[in-house]
Image: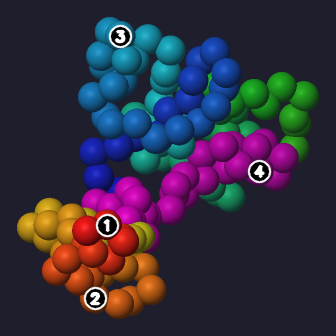
Amino acid sequence: MSDGFVEVYDTITGLKQRVPAHFVDDPILGRNIQKTPSQRALEGQLGQAPTEASTVAEIRSFADEAEIDVSGLRKHADLLGAVQAVVGTDPLPEPATPGVDVELGGGPSTDVDTPIGDTPSPDGTEPSDNSAADAGQE
């Protein structure tokens, strides 16, 4: 997925989020964020992710490089499961509508060419030409 955004985590809160890629290298915007292991794996920075064919040593090496805590795990299946739970294959789904963050709902028309006195009343009747006479003023 190359939409200009990357998956990062906040180093203070640990919360995961997507930000524009240039935030990571910015000295201000990127000071408290790091790319997630899954993002680094997707970019090929961590090498090939472990598979069922990987040895325990290979899985541990990948986990250390990706900063994945596997302390206390000894079995191949447990180690592989821990790494795959963090890295996965695609950390975030594709957006439903590319390029659209929020769809605006259809609200009342705000036609700027219509003079205020010419707008229809809420009950659907047409406005009259003599609004002062309608209000009881003569």
Q: Amino acid at mark 2?
A: Glu
Which residue is tagged 4? Answer: 81
Which residue is tagged 1? Answer: 137
Q: Mark 1 falls on what kind of element?
A: loop
Residue 74 on the magenta segment: no
Q: Amino acid at mark 4?
A: Gly
Which residue is tagged 3? Answer: 28
Indicate whether 7 appears above or below 118: above
Say which residue appears at 43% left-offset and 64% top-offset: 94
Span highlighted in magenta in the image: 77-104
Per the model, the C-alpha gap separating discs 1 and 4 is 81 Å
Per the model, the C-alpha gap separating discs 1 and 3 is 64 Å
Per the model, the C-alpha gap separating discs 2 and 1 is 19 Å
Which mark is nearer the camera, 4 or 2? Answer: 2
Residue 95: which disc? none
Mark 3 or mark 2: which comes first in sequence? 3
- Residue 108 % position (x, y): 36, 72
- Residue 80 % position (x, y): 73, 48
Q: Amino acid at mark 3?
A: Ile
**Within 10 Å of the Cα at label 2, are there few (<14), some (14-19), or many (20+) other Cα atoms?**
few
Q: Mark 4 falls on what kind of element?
A: helix
Mark 1 or mark 3: which comes first in sequence? 3
